[in-house]
Amino acid sequence: ARPDIVGSAGVTSGHDRIFGVDKMVDAMMHDMGRIGALWDVVWQQLSRVALHPRATVRVFGVPSLTQLIIAAFKHRASPKVDASPKVDGSPGEVASPNTSPSEYDFDLERRLLATFDELYRCPYPDTRDAVLQGLYEVLQCCG
């Protein structure tokens, strides 16, 4: 059984409920290279937050998703550094950004953006507004 990071079971303060969400987002921000492999788990947990019956919990869901999506797009667009030293001992070269159509993972991009589509279909107006704001932020930051 998976732990309940949202805190719907038992009586806890709002801060305690969101602690797990905050730590998961922090961990993903530091491990952005694995976002493709971990996105389904992250999305499953954050969607529970964004769709929680209590508005005080929902308010953290979409901004957390937006933060991760923006970081994922920026990470994928950043140049990759070849960390292995050259034969002469100098540091490795900075490669061009991973933007060639043959190497770019459009499926991950679709999966990341599909979260906004799924959340927009929820019954909560505040979540739908947050989805539109989040999509606007992604477009402003990442084009």
Image: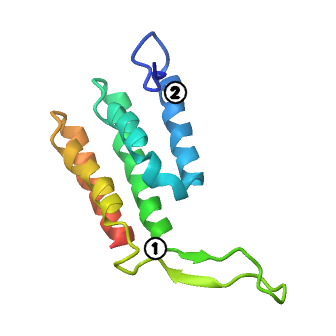
Q: Position of residue 9 (x, y in %)?
A: 41, 13
Tell me the amino acid under the disc marked 1.
Ala
Residue found farthest to the front:
87
The residue sitting at 30% across, 29% down in the picture is 55
Q: Position of residue 4 (x, y in %)?
A: 45, 21
Q: Position of residue 11 (x, y in %)?
A: 46, 10
Q: Is residue 143 toward the left or the right of residue 24 in the image?
A: left
Q: Which mark is residue 77?
A: 1
- Camera-side residue: 67 or 41? 41
The residue sitting at 38% across, 48% down in the picture is 65
Question: Can residue 119 be seen from the camera position used here?
Answer: yes
Q: Is residue 56 toward the left or the right of residue 82 in the image?
A: left
Q: Counting residues from the N terminus, which is met first, the one under dot 1 or under dot 2?
A: 2
Q: Which mark is residue 15?
A: 2
Q: Residue 123 falls in which quadrant of the image? A: top left
Q: Is residue 12 toward the left or the right of residue 117 in the image?
A: right
105 lies above or below 127: below
The residue sitting at 57% across, 52% down in the picture is 31
| Disc 2, SS | helix
Closer to the observer: label 1 or label 2?
Answer: 1
